[in-house]
Amino acid sequence: MIQSVKETVAAGKLKLVEGVVQEALNGGATPEEVLDSMAVAMDEVGDKFQKNEIYVPEMLIAAKTMQRGVGVLKPLMAGDAGAKYGTFIIGTVAGDLHDIGKNLVAIMVEAAGFEVVDLGIDVPAEKFVEAIKAHPDCKVVGVSALLTTTMESMRNTVKTIIDAGLQSQVKIMVGGAPITQAFADEIGADAYTTDAASAASKARELAC
Ligand code: B1M
């Protein structure tokens, strides 16, 4: 069952994915197991893209398929913790259009008890600053990047937030496939996490 989730996402079978995900859940798979299998599918898609076996349109349809599959899981992952930790602002940095990982972080952080303000993709550094200023109850801001080329955009985003004097209000958390703890330290971020679940628990820690 889990295997067919992976195959369905990797093959970009958009119309089938909701049914396949539901079947896997009915068969006893947990939402986390289903999510992991979709992430493995995306890694396979990325590998095939790198080897020129598939191209951007196939990568895009696989991404849409995963997003639709995540839609089935979302109600199961989103708890009713309420927004007791204030607002969590998140976005993907300027120049970067990848949002599946960011969306997963947003779902898990919301379930952990934050009100999430999602700025979307390709977000200019100044927009993060404006959003933080507009939400005085925001204690944590999340910055995502998926391309090695947009790591510099992440550096600029973190610098812009710090230069605006906002680090006394918010802690800055960064993440995304090319990001490392060393890079997070180098650019002055307060925290780095590898995945959505650890981002959620880290956000709680930072908000307290
Ligand atoms: Co793109 N892409 N892509 N892509 N894409 C990658 C990232 C790539 C590794 C593929 C490859 O070559 N193997 C490669 C980057 C190489 C590099 O930088 N060294 C790449 C490339 C090259 C490109 C283009 C340049 C291709 C082109 O046009 N020639 C182009 C760039 C566009 C742009 O952004 N300007 C491009 C475009 C696209 C699509 C639009 C087609 C599509 C994105 C659609 C979308 O997101 N809505 C796409 C996709 C789907 C991928 C892959 C296949 C999958 C990404 C994904 O969603 N993974 C990807 C290969 C791969 O990742 N293996 C690839 C699943 C997701 C759950 O994981 O996003 O890593 P991830 O999120 C994780 C963690 O990273 C973490 O938590 C999540 C899991 O719990 N995390 C955080 C993420 N953000 C976090 C923030 C946090 C904490 C944790 O705190 C705030």
Image (cartoon, rainbow, N blue to C red):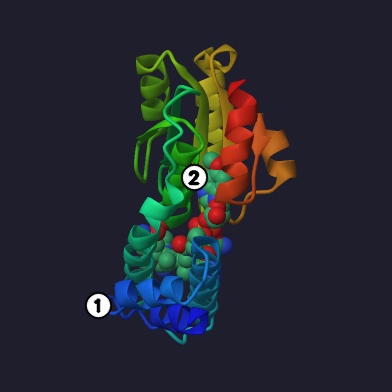
- Determine which quarter of the picture holds residue 62: bottom left
**Element assignment for label 2:** helix
Residue 97 is at least partly visible in this image:
no
Q: Say if 98 sits above or below 154 in the image.
A: below
Amino acid type of the residue tagged 2 in the rendering: Met
| Rendering coords of residue 158 (x, y %) | 55, 30
Label 1 CA crowd tier, 10 Å (few <14, some 14–19, many 20+): few
Q: Which mark is residue 108?
A: 2
Question: Mark 1 CB in 8 Å range of ligand 1?
Answer: no
Q: Which residue lies under the disc numbered 1?
A: 15
Q: Residue furthest bottom?
A: 53
Residue 141 is at least partly visible in this image:
yes
Question: Mark 2 CB in 8 Å range of ligand 1?
Answer: yes
| Rendering coords of residue 166 (x, y %) | 52, 15
Front-most of residues 165 and 172: 172
Q: Which mark is residue 165?
A: none
Question: Which circle's residue, 1 or 2, is located before the other in the chain?
Answer: 1
Residue visible at 42% across and 13% down in the picture = 136
Q: Say if 61 sits above or below 206 in the image.
A: below
| Spatial CA span between label 1 and label 2 | 25 Å
Residue visible at 36% across and 21% down in the picture = 130
Front-most of residues 152 and 15: 15
Residue visible at 38% across and 17% down in the picture = 135
Amino acid type of the residue tagged 1 in the rendering: Lys
Residue visible at 47% across and 23% down in the picture = 84
**Element assignment for label 1:** loop
Label 2 CA crowd tier, 10 Å (few <14, some 14–19, many 20+): many
Q: Is residue 118 left or right of residue 86?
A: left
Q: Is residue 206 left or right of residue 41?
A: right
| Rendering coords of residue 76 (x, y %) | 42, 54
